[in-house]
Image (cartoon, coloured by chain):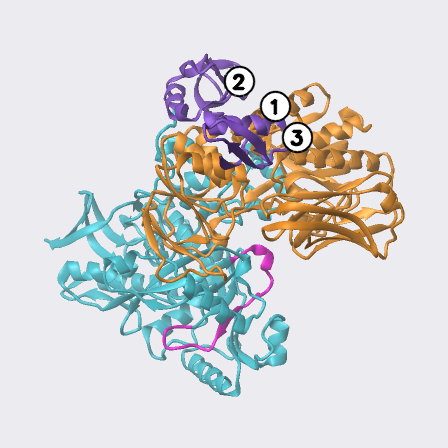
Amino acid sequence: MTEILNYDLVVVGGGPAGMAAALAAKDNGVPEEKIIVLERDVRLGGILEQCIHTGFGLTYFGEELSGPEYADRFVKLMDETKIAVKLNTMVLNITKENQVIATNKEDGLITINAKAIILAMGCRERPRGALDIAGSRPAGVMSAGQAQKFVNIDGYMPGHEVVILGSGDIGLIMARRMTLEGAKVKVVCEVMPYSGGLQRNIVQCLEDFDIPLRLSCTVIKVHGRDRVEGVTIANVDDHMLPIPGTEEYIPCDTVLLSVGLIPENELSKQIDLDMDMITRGPKVDEMRMTSQPGVFACGNVLQVHDLVDFVTQESQIAGKGAAQYISGLRHEGVIKTRGQNGVRYTVPQSINLDEKEDVKIYFRVGNVYHDKRVVVTCGDKVLFNRKKIKLAPGEMENVIIKAADIAEMTADQEIVVSIEEA
Amino acid sequence: MVYDIAIIGAGVVGTQIARNFSKYDLKVALLEKESDVAMGTTKANSGIVHAGFDCQSGTLMADLNVKGCRMMEEVATTLHVPYERNGSLVVAFSEEEMGTIKELYDRGITNGLTEDELKIIDRDELVKLEPHIADNAVGALYAPTAGIVSPYELAIGAAECAVGNGVEFLRTFNVGGIIFEDGLFTIGAKDGRIIRSKWVVNAAGLFANLIADNFNNEKFKVIPRIGEYGLLDRDVYPLVTHTVFQCPTKMGKGILVAPTTHHNVFVGPTSLDMEDNMDGRHDTSVRVGALRETYAAAQKSIPSVSARDQITSFAGLRAHWVEHDFYIAPAKNNDHFINLIGIESPGLAASPAIAEYTENLILGIMGEKPAEKADWNPSRKAPVFFRTMSPEERAELIAKDPAYSRIVCRCETVTEGEIRDAIRAPAGAVDLDGVKRRTRAGMGRCQGGFCGSRVMEILSEELDKPIAEITKFGRASDIIYERTK
Amino acid sequence: MTERKLICVACPRGCPITVYMDDSGEITKVEGNTCPRGDTYARAEVTHPERSLTSTVKVTGGKHYVVPCKSSTAIPKELLFDAMVEINKASIAAPVHIGDVIIKDILGTGADIVATNEID
């Protein structure tokens, strides 16, 4: 028989999002012994455990920490509470009645009745299959994150001569890591005309080590029968199609892919939450509640963040939202948000009209822009209008909507974030 | 060691022949040049159990296809292999193509299909069967008994059954040469191993003609023909539930859109003749342009099929004999050496019948039928699929062994227990891809990104091998190298 | 007068900074930074570039084979690979705690190599 437990709040995922959400729920009045965090790995911390580089925590802690150090701050806080944690535990499904079914070796199948659930499963890397790379299917093609785990956690070299496809941050970070550990990183290819990673990573991970970054360039073929023996790269045109005559063969034994992250939304889809086709996460209101009452989402499962500091902030909102929900607070009437003119998406996708506090709307742009204005309107009213020197798809932006403005809104209106000429 | 029968090639044909002979009191060896079963044509296959209407009437291919299709459900069910009688449709987009449909229908009847097994349907019926079919589809040939089977799991199931009944599975036995002396074959592997056998069954797929040539200079012109596929996310299902063909062309059965037994939808295959040499037999490179064209072609049948949903693409090679028939017969001057040549599509559908035909051929030449084992088990231990179990079944399973309570592969919900089973099974998995084919760990939308290193740890434990020696698919397919520190 | 354009690496914000120098190489102005750390970074970058270093060190007797580590302060950029040689030679016995000093004053830079995770 399966064990049935009762908790006010079940947090799915014990990474930075899950921990911050659980702690915030406690700080907002949920009894700590009525909160449980379910984590699939052997320890709390999530992906931060393998992100051993520094750059975490500047916004939140005002100091520069490595991933494990950032995680440990929250692990220590968790340790001081009576919040229950189950490690090596995978959630199998969530029901419409907010029941969580999970499994682990110690307890077997567990059923938990929850008043509220916070989804904090993080994200995962896009695999190769989604890309059109010609050629054979040898060993040695892996995601940058997989290589990161081999090097930083398991202590193994996944290759010696490396080509990296995609200039996402993990790819850039791994270019430096592999180089420092003795591998030769031959080139980083980016199919877009701009990098998807942070500027500082291009400087300190590539330029510092003279690793070339080729923009508008991609791997068109993988060679090798057993293990990768080389790749053919080529420049691409405006339609991202390889330009004949630009092919170049590069011998290597490893191809690392850093071609984007996708929210880990198996559970969200399974409980049939309204999903945002662009973020690939569930649609949420400003408290990060999804379309299923009592189910909240935060962190990379909601939208892929660049900075863990923002994950923490967002998760604290979700934790507070869950606490309010558990205490019985219900909202009526929402106003929708959306992006246009180059704004690909907005999070939250809706705001409750009775919201009494300022709301931060996060968004990403679809291209690189210089000297433009970020304009937010609601009906005829301009809520925000500020000049930005630079906007890039790799960097998440935000605008603040004032509580006073929300108080004047009606459900038939919408909040529109757009990029306008300066 | 002297065997009664040595079978070369552990594809879907070789493994089923091994299974058929495992019921007799015979010493049988199954020789495979790779580290696992199903590593050749069987691995990258459409998985279609064709009804048998489009084979040239009067050929062995037509006969064995029709028979094999009728046998498949029983074989697959007995071996606990995913099989579904989903039916196939050949869709016509013009009245002219309806003419082709009629020809196919007539041919099917000539090939021995009954009127229950083959129907011509109009657009209305077609739309009922496939709601997402293109607006300009006018009708179809419907074969309700056609099915889908997981090709590599069929080979795995047959091999487990065979090995469970005493067949010896010799991995990485890459046949270098065969000589016949004093009524006995001596078979040498390229690594120096030697076995002797009274009979040889050459079921080496793409390499069968090379082995036949090597043995006694008997020549068959077999061309490696590549087929590329795009596999879509399971979310797409039920975009199609039947196997949806277009009217056939000279190069094959044309582009199809179909579900797999695990309800991924796929498009393909392309068709291109490769060089008739070793490189041509090893090059399973996917061509991007061809795959793009495939999607475009597939959209003719099902307009909403999209490459955006692709989770992986792959290519397989088929052994195309220029005579375009199955050739199953003793070698010139030696009736104890049986060649199976040109086993290409519908080879999978025909495979149970091919195995039976080969069995009967050998028994006929033997004259006296060997004794049957009293304790022969036609099946194998049913593999556990946690993902498809009810909560009650899951609880029961976990109570028996907590290894089933640890999920290793998130995308496909595969437990540690299933992975250990796959490794411990007769002819079990020895590498990452072997585990993937048996359990689906790594086959989902993240393609092993999360579970790969965890599966490697389990393989390392079970096989008592350092983790750095665990490969993707044998040979030199190393995944990781030395310690960083 | 010369100017050098830099991307600040002091934090993930990545401000574009311009450093103006006179003919003798003396820094006359730093522009584009949004915090004092950027100013410090830019001045150092044009005179003696420094980087913080992160890697892993072998653990003996622990649950994990390696522990992540970092340099307690930035070290001269040209010493990164020499520092890696030292780090690859080092090891530490479990249990390891965040902040445990693994190598003191690496290569005389004044920076320590410290553990950045807990290993039982």
Residue type at numbered disc 2: Asp
Label 3, label 2: how far apart the Cα atoms are: 30 Å
Question: Are the residues at dot 3 and dot 1 in contact (C-beta closer than 8 Å)?
Answer: no
The residue at which mark 2 appears reads as: C120
Of the chain colours in the picture, the one used for chain A is orange
Q: Dot 3, crowdedness within 10 Å: few (<14), some or many (≥20)?
A: some
Q: Are marks 2 and 1 on the same chain?
A: no
Tell me, yes or no, whether the highlighted magenta stretch contains residue A205.
no
Residue type at numbered disc 3: Thr
Residue at 49% x, 64% y: name it. B267
Name the side, left or right, on which A299 lies relative to B184. right
Which corner quadrant of the image does residue B337 belong to?
bottom left
Question: Are the residues at dot 3 and dot 2 in contact (C-beta closer than 8 Å)?
Answer: no
Q: Position of residue B370 (x, y in %)?
A: 28, 55
Q: Mark 1 lies on which chain?
A: A
Number of numbered markers? 3
The residue at which mark 3 appears reads as: A59
Nearer to us: label 3 or label 1: 3
Nearer to us: label 3 or label 2: 3
Residue type at numbered disc 1: Asp
Q: Where is residue A20 in the image (x, y as percent from the top left)?
A: 70, 30
The residue at which mark 1 appears reads as: A72
Of the chain colours in the picture, the one used for chain C is purple
Residue at 38% x, 26% y: name it. C81
* Closest to the observer, A5 or A400: A400
Label 3, label 1: how far apart the Cα atoms are: 17 Å
Tell me, yes or no, whether the highlighted magenta stretch contains residue B234.
yes
Residue bounds of the magenta highlight: B232-253
Q: Position of residue C27 (x, y in %)?
A: 52, 28
Of the chain colours in the picture, the one used for chain B is cyan
